[in-house]
Image (cartoon, rainbow, N blue to C red):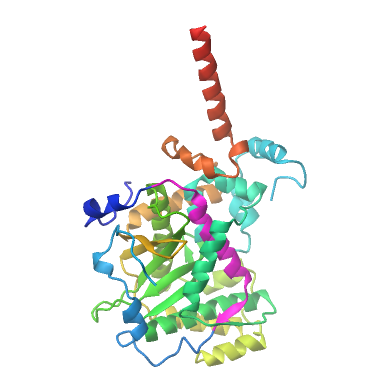
Amino acid sequence: MAEPETSSSNNNNKKNNIPIEIVSDEEMAFIEAAYASVTSSSIFARSLSSCCSSSTPSSSPRLHNSSLSINSITLLSKRKISSSCGGGGDIEDALRCVDSRKKPAVSDSFLRRFRKKRALSVTDLTSTEWCPKQMEFSLLLGGKKVNQFMKAGIARHAKLEAEVITRVEVKVQSQEDRWALKLLNFINGVNQLLFEGLTRELPIIGFADDVWMIGVIDEVRMPLTENDHNPILIDTKTRARDTLPAEPQRRNGRLQLMCYKYMWDNLVADNFPSRKFFTYFGLNPQSILCEDLKVLSGDSGFSAMTLDDVVRYYRNTYTMLSPANDQLLLRYEYQKDHSLLCEDKFAYDSEWLKDQIHSCLEFWLGDQEATYVHEDERWKCRFCQYAPVCPANTDSKEMSANTSNDSKAKEG
């Protein structure tokens, strides 16, 4: 199926103001991966002092001052706005292990080997879409290193979050506590959304296509019109250079936001099988919460003693919501001064998304071996840390060398 189209108003007049440059994918999926790893390991809760104000979406000054013109945006001119296969050996040895590996059975799939008792993240899906072979290498040979561009993206997201959320440290004592905290942060984030019309860094956990998925939505806003109750999902990307993203990067960003809407809408439809949740992650629903979480739940307006209590309040919260808006928004900022490079507004395409998710899950479930990127997108290899050992890259070099030798032979 063809990729979903983006809105194109004013494109002809605006798009040439900023050059389009192909840059490293580290500015895209890997920034989100690094940020997700940081937030997942930090045990913090949202402070309710910022989540339970008495203001409403229509009267919140902050909402009006920072609101986005959803109906008029597309590519805008820049403007200012406030483990490996074995235990040892070198990478070549590990590569030989990867190449000799037979197609895995479902019981030995990447999902079971590397995400057992864990949810598949949205970043896992977008990284697989970017390059399945690179995703395979990252699982078998080790993950990506955090570079300065990724650190800058992490810092920018943290700053945006701090504008609307105050976090307090929570001392969790068990896996049940960790999951309860994720659910409580969602509950408090939704409270903020409903009271103030805006929340950021909202964790979302859902069950879709028989797989547990998790993600963190950059920003959720309530529409400014009274008749529209469908929250707007927004994602902010930071770029090291003041250039527009290449189409494969924009496609990858669209996939990310569509996944969030898919998960959101599944929750709203009450598709959260709690028994499967407890069983899959090996959780005891009657596990007593740590004292910090008991206090946090009380501040949230309900009294929770166990994980099961939190799950029930989680359900009460998401069933109050409407499906996410069909119009999604990607924002691209220049890292140096946070100026806006462009805004990409596009429509949700359920069929395209399902095809993408199905393709990614085939890799994770062991039904499809990792493939290389299409020839037209082999420029990605220039920015990949696994390029020196990737057969796609080495084969291309050998072919170029053979072609060059043949040409010299003919000249001789």
Toward which corner of the image does residue 278 lie, by quadrant?
A: bottom right
Identify which residue is drawn at 55% across, 64% down.
35
Q: Quadrant of residue 310?
A: bottom right
From the top left corner, tell me how far across and down residue 382 is, in percent: 52, 40
Q: In this orientation, does residue 349 appear?
A: yes
Majority SS type along the magenta span: helix
Viewer-side residue, 13 vs 145 = 13
Nearer to us in this view, 209 or 213: 213
- What's the residue at 53%, 85% (across, down)? 47
Q: Is residue 272 left or right of residue 54?
A: right
Q: Quadrant of residue 102?
A: top right
Q: Where is residue 374 in the image (x, y as percent from the top left)?
A: 44, 38
**Where's residue 45, x and y in %?**
57, 81
Q: Does the magenta stretch include residue 34?
A: yes
- Marks counted in the figure total 0
Above or below — where is 56 with respect to 87?
Answer: below
> Bounds of the magenta span?
21-46
Classify 375 as above or below 115: above
User: Residue shown at 53%/9% (left/top)?
Assistant: 409
Q: Horizontal placement of 219 versus 61: left or right?
A: right
92 within the magenta span: no
Q: Residue furthest right?
A: 88
Q: Can residue 368 be seen by looking at this rendering?
A: no
Q: Where is residue 107 in the image (x, y as percent from the top left)?
A: 63, 51
